[in-house]
Image (cartoon, grey):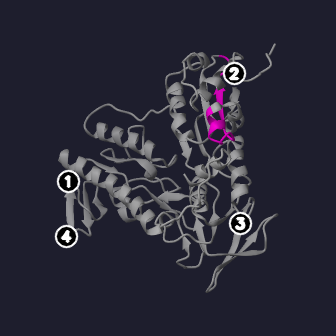
Amino acid sequence: MIEETKQLQKAGIDFSGPIINLDRLRASKDQVIRKLTEGLSVLAKKRKVTVIHGTGYFASKHRIIVEGSKQDKAIQFDHAIIATGSVATNIPGLPEDDRIMDSTRALELIDIPKSLLVIGGGIVGLELACIYQALGSHITIVELRDQLMLETDADLIKPLQARLRNTCDAIYLNTKVAGIDPQPEHLKVSFEGPEAPDSENFDRILVAVGRSPHLAPLQIQTAGISATSSGFISTDNQQRTNIPHIFAIGDAVGPPMLAHKATHEGKVAAEVAAGCDSVFHARVIPSVAYTDPEIAWVGLTEKTAIERRIAYKKSIFPWTASGRALSVGRSEGFTKLLFDPETNKVLGAGIVGISAGDLISELCLAIEMGCESEDISLTIHPHPTLSETIAFSAEAYQGTITDLYVPTKK
């Protein structure tokens, strides 16, 4: 919203700068979390679910021990579902200093540092960079590889990267942190890379280089549960581990490490444990980066198509031709669709721009239902909205669009 008020200045509506009360901001954030978690507690109680708080570990294939409650408790079970999530991955050799934080601690909003170094140009690092930049921090991003958010197509990153280059102090690609020297007034950081400076000083450092399964306390080996070389639990399409009555879901079983994937896996595991013949079979799982602008994609990416030599055709509708995007001053985005050249079915999609995470759902459904380009273009979308850019992109593929001039292909 801070960024939106800046955009409105171009339309002749001026606001004074925001006054950020960090205590109230933190309290508001905590209240949202508390409301959600209390809601889960109510739902559990209504469904007669017993909740025991503590640290659990396997004592055998049919028993766990829970420590940390009023007294240690042994629980016998017929079935178990492991849903312990993940933790932030650390970089070995970093000094111990309260000014160095992971993504979990960054969300505590301890303060708004004057200068913040973000180590890692993936989704989490960029999301938090956007938040802290909007709140007033000077941001520097360092990424070891040659592209931000390497898991998606490079063209989707360009509008975000262009915006970040305007709002951040620096973005260093192909660069690594060579050392961190804690000093009383700041953290002195040295870098290695073709375009990196020798050293810079920062008030805080955010380490966002990935997440790892949170399994160590569980002692899964006691129950005979197998894990991959990466530390994730191996499961079949019913979420069973190699121990048939023990299931695992979510981040514990590997990427994509997304809450919406975990929810669907959890339902499958519960149904199978209850005797249903359910399987986890999602054609696609959408990904969203809650940056500014947002980036969302689902299904086949161009990067994957090229690597696997999958035939595709694409169409792009630039938001510079969207009345809604222009009216809110956010026309940097675009909507991209990938089609099967033989069947015209939607294979994948990518959207960059405000509310991309909300817009992508239509394309998730389109792929799940096997929609062709005309199924989308002939569905009347409301105007003026950002959602109609999806229909326009389908029309561009067909050559029927009137909102753009696309030369007819002979």
Sequence-wise, the earlier of marks 3 and 2 is 3
Cβ atoms at labels 4 and 2 below 8 Å apart: no
Residue highlighted by disc 1 = 50
Amino acid at the residue labelled 1: Thr
Q: Is residue 371 left or right of residue 60?
A: right
Name the quadrant of the C terminus. Answer: top right
Element type at mark 2: helix
**Separation of disc 2 and disc 1 at Cα?**
54 Å
Q: Which residues are magenta?
A: 324-342
Closest to the camera, between mark 3 and mark 2, is 2
The x and y percentages for residue 135 are 57, 62
Do the residues under discs 3 and 2 have CB atoms within 8 angstroms? no
Q: Residue 121 location in percent, x, y?
A: 65, 57
Which residue is depicted at the point 32% across and 31% down? 277
Q: Earlier in the sequence, mark 4 or mark 1?
A: 1
Q: Which mark is residue 70?
A: 4
C-alpha separation, residue under disc 4 versus residue under disc 2: 63 Å
- Which is more N-terminal, label 1 or label 2? 1
- Alpha carbons under labels 4 and 3: distance apart: 46 Å
